[in-house]
Image (cartoon, rainbow, N blue to C red):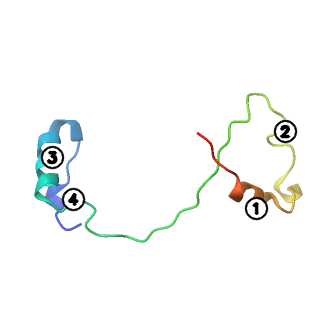
Amino acid sequence: MNNPEKTICFQNDHIPLMNSYRDAGPAYPTEVIDEFATITFIRDCGADNDEVINCPASELPADFLQICNSAEITL
């Protein structure tokens, strides 16, 4: 981090100070850090649904990962 002194704890107590840092620029982040993560798809299948987990991982369909990775997310 280029300016650790601009790191603030509980932000609600420091909003005017944070606004002054933003207005003075540059706005954070000033460094881009390439990171990656696994994105987990979560779907509401309802309560007491025995179809949610109905087999061990070794018995999942061959296309299971493709189904999960290509599923559309609707909000």
Eye-nearest disc, 2 or 1? 1
- Regarding mark 1 in the picture, which secondary structure is present there? helix
Q: CA distance from mark 3 to mark 4?
A: 10 Å
Q: Amino acid at mark 2?
A: Glu
Residue shown at 74% from the left, 28% from the top? 47
State the residue position of label 4.
27
**Quadrant of the rendered image containing residue 42:** top right
Q: Amino acid at mark 1?
A: Gln
Q: Amino acid at mark 3?
A: Asn
Badge 3 or badge 4: first in the primary sequence: 3
Checking the image for residue 19, the label placed there is: 3
Q: CA distance from mark 2 to mark 1?
A: 19 Å
Q: Residues within 10 Å of mark 1 (few under 14, many from 20)?
A: few
In the image: residue 10, left or right of residue 73: left
Eye-nearest disc, 2 or 3? 3
**Quadrant of the rendered image containing residue 45:** top right
Badge 2 or badge 3: first in the primary sequence: 3
Q: CA distance from mark 1 to mark 4?
A: 39 Å
Residue shown at 80% from the left, 32% from the top? 49
**Closer-to-camera residue (70/18):** 70
Q: 21 above or below 62?
A: above
Checking the image for residue 51, the label placed there is: 2
Q: Residue 28 location, x and y as percent?
A: 25, 60
Q: CA distance from mark 3 to mark 1?
A: 45 Å
Residue shown at 83% from the left, 61% from the top? 63
Residue shown at 67% from the left, 50% from the top? 72
Q: 74 above or below 31?
A: above
| Quadrant where the image shows the N terminus | bottom left
- Regarding mark 4 in the picture, which secondary structure is present there? loop
